[in-house]
Amino acid sequence: LDLREEDLEIGKAMGEGAGGTVVMATHRPTQTPMALKFIRADYSMRQQILKELQILHECNSPYIVSFYGAYPKDNGVQVCLEYMDLRSFDHIYRTNGPIPVPVVGRVTFSVLQGLKYLYEDLRVMHRDIKPSNILLNSLGFIKLCDFGISKEMVSSIANTFVGTASYMSPERMIGGSYTVKSDIWSFGLTLMELVLGRYPLKGETGSMSIFEMLSYINSETLPLLPEDQYPPALCDLVAKCLIKDPAKRPTIKDLLDHQYTRECAVAKVNIEQWAASLAIADY
Ligand code: ADP
Ligand code: MG
């Protein structure tokens, strides 16, 4: 697909995150709907980001949002992505209530497959797992987006990021380097949020500074999913992801081997049917 800016018909705005804005668009020649993500970056970073995004052309997984192309624009880079018509899981639970457990099982399986693909095939970490970066479409596909493909992009976003720590692992809060174990922590919190239909720790998303969050995580026992209300295997998986010591936290391989993931891999869940029943949030 040869992407030219003049072929894109800009549609409605879909939201604003830490790193930039997202708008919907249609690629007129092919009538392909797209999500356009604008990332602010200075001139030297723009070149670097565009170079690093090239590897996304080889990214091909049903668990990762497709990349159509990117070009420099104004004071940043415009990234053209597959449009996921039912949007992200934060919107979905805010409009429809807690995500049903069988669907959470499918999310578990899909996100772990997506992470495995990122780690093994693209050799990148995700770095920003949270409900708003897990997307759904009406065909029933669950896909990851916004992973840290580009170091420049991550730092460019980090620079404009005015510190909330909602999904950050404790080792990152004290300034340690990002590792795959940090992704696992964020994944555990995310699953818990979908099941409960609310941010699972004290406060709301974004209401605590890194400092407040770190002292909270260090001083109190973190909430767990109650085993009498949810599948014990799911509760166990979430609890393991939220082990404070990264050395004791499971790896992606451990999680793929976990009993809950094995059950999810073979469970028959009709996501397409569930998706058709959803109310969609206003843009
Ligand atoms: P954040 O992820 O922090 O909410 P973003 O700028 O990444 O901020 O995204 C803003 C919103 O746009 C998200 O809440 C999500 O619902 C929506 N969005 C992002 N990418 C897509 C996409 N490819 N298809 C559909 N909706 C998207
Ligand atoms: Mg996002």
Image (cartoon, rainbow, N blue to C red):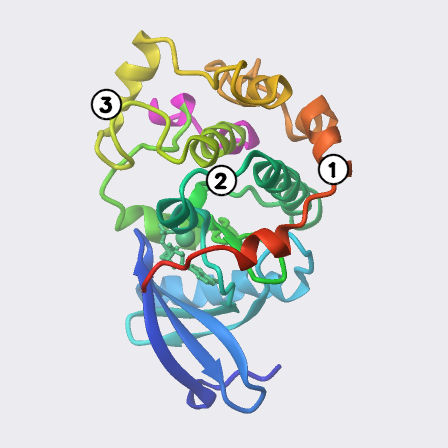
Q: Residues within 10 Å of mark 1 (few under 14, many from 20)?
A: few
Label number found at residue 99? 2
Nearest to N terminus: mark 2 or mark 1: 2
**CB within 8 Å, label 2 to label 1:** no
Mark 2, secondary structure of its residue: loop
For badge 3, the amino acid type reads Phe
Which quadrant: the C terminus?
A: bottom left
Q: Which portion, as a residue range, is magenta?
A: 170-183
**Compared with residue 240, is residue 136 higher up or lower down, i.e. above or below?**
below
The CA span between labels 2 and 1 is 16 Å
Label number found at residue 267? 1
**Position of residue 213 measured from the top left corner of the image (x, y, whole percent):** 28, 23
The CA span between labels 3 and 2 is 30 Å
Which quadrant: the N terminus?
A: bottom right
Return the residue at label 3.
Answer: 211
Whether residue 125 can be seen here: yes
Q: Residue at x 39, y 33 (%)?
A: 167
For badge 2, the amino acid type reads Ile
